[in-house]
Amino acid sequence: MNKLRLLLFVLLFFPILSFSQEKQNNFEISKSIDIYNNVFRYLNQNYVDEINPAELNEIAINAMLKELDPYTVFIPESEIEDVRLLTMGEYGGIGSIISYYDDNVHISEPYENFPAHKAGLLPGDAIMEINGVNTEKKTVAEVSELLKGQPGSKLTLKIKREGEKDIITKTLTREKIKIDNIPYYTVLEGGVAYIILNQFTKDAAKELKEAFLEMKAQNELKGLVIDLRGNGGGLLNEAVDIVNLFVPKNKLVVYTQGKTPEQNRNYYTKQEPEDTEIPLAILVNQSSASASEIVSGSIQDFDRGVIVGQRTFGKGLVQNILPMNYNTQMKVTVSKYYIPSKRCIQEIDYSKKSKNDTVAMNDTLGPQFKTANGRIVYEGHGIQPDVKIEPEMVSTITVHLYAQNMIFKYANKFYKEHKSIAAPNEFEITDEIYDDFVKFVEQQDFKYTSESEKDFELLVETAKLEGYYEKIKPQLDILENELKNHKDNDLINNKKEISEILKMEIVGRYYFQKGKIISTLKDDVELNRAVEILLNSNGENEYENLLKSL
């Protein structure tokens, strides 16, 4: 009876508490808006210089939202087109990746058969002017805005091509640029289908289904690998529909929980699946997030396939885009994702962010949950792979060669000197090509500081502070010379690693994005491991064993 009375008390009193809290919040909001308006008005009336109200307002809004989480953001009118790109995967433009270096924005990679490619723009072309607007020292974002526009509209570019004195003028017609959800798919040796899914924009599930059924109709498939590495997510419904291809109808794939009942939703598979039997592997890494985690996490929870790679990003927050006045929008975090085992994939609890604006990622295992077969999985750290593969470490010199555009610029040089190369899966960096690359780098103003040099400099400074420097200087001089000798050989010692990246960059000049992908498949450690599991190459029925309860 006491419990019943307590329950009735809570039920009766809770609405009063909620109403009281809401009333208090409304008062605080009203008061804050009044103070904010006064600050603006007094600044405008009294500040010594002219202020820019729109700019200050956007700064204030962004600072406020920054206190919540990285995904709750204000979207000004000028960025509406970028939102469309994220959700629809399309925009009006010339179809090219651009980057900033040497005081200019340059063409990095034209998309095959789009306006930039059709007009003959090449990687390395410096964009000097767009429709009469000088672009020197403009940012990538500013140049990107000038390049975008209504499909069918024309624009005139003035470009400076490396090695040529004259400015080149190109007239292009903008087109609707659709970024492929699936840039490449194929059947690998052994009968394993492979599909790269780069994003979850409109029709991602439809495109994946078509690619899979096409390969299935033409081959006796032994397994399927879906590559979600680097896929930051996208539309939730596309993720659910992709899971539905391999999981029976009426299965709960994901549900959301938020502050209000309308934010609590369940997402079930709605159609009959295409294939519930084919062995399935999902490739993930630290950049696989959101919708990628829903697909990989639910496949893991249903014990429908194995997850291979590294722990995923851990983004389990749901955002809605809310239209506001003056053609602005706000993307607001409204709920959290939970997958079939009832675990949340969110890594960081932003509500516990400290005042110094730091949030810690917790490496300890979270609460335990169980998959359909009773396997133990954990909450709060993204998706832990069933087969973990440590990411390959990249040497310091390779990072700097890439960052300083040495590899990019050499690929441009190579392209000018060679009309054609072998097919993407056959082309290799020969000793002759690599030696030429080394000479090219030596002729450039290429400098970098190794991690060992940084540590050595710190050691010297510490020795000076502690009064040891003069006593150990002879030993320090020997160590410094040894470090220099080893550093001088970095290009040779890291030849294999550098050659792989150089090969991909050169292949891209001739065969574009698809060629780059093909050139990397043979040496893809994670992909090869997934194929080995699906084909049970070790004879131990590894695939089935991985999905069994421990």
Image (tube, rainbow, N blue to C red):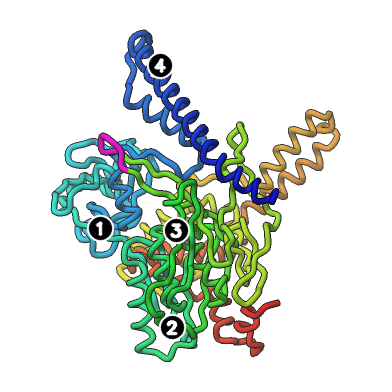
Q: Residue at x 44, y 29 (%)?
A: 26
First to last magenta residue range: 323-328
The answer to which of marks 1 and 2 sits earlier in the sequence is 1
The answer to if 59 sits in the magenta stretch is no
Identified at 46% across, 55% down, the residue is 264
Q: Residues within 10 Å of mark 4 (few under 14, many from 20)?
A: few
Task: Give amino acid for label 3.
Answer: Arg
C-alpha distance separating marks 2 and 3: 26 Å
Determine the CA span between mark 1 and mark 2. 32 Å
Q: Between marks 2 and 4, how big is the CA–CA gap?
A: 62 Å
Distance between the alpha carbons at the discs numbered 4 and 1:
44 Å
Q: Is residue 526 visible?
A: no
Could you say which disc has been placed on residue 39 in the image? 4
Q: Nearer the viewer, mark 3 or mark 1?
A: 3
- Badge 1: residue crowd in 10 Å (few <14, some 14–19, many ≥20): many
Q: Residue 345: in sight, yes or no? A: yes
Residue position for label 1: 177
Secondary structure state at the residue bearing disc 4: helix
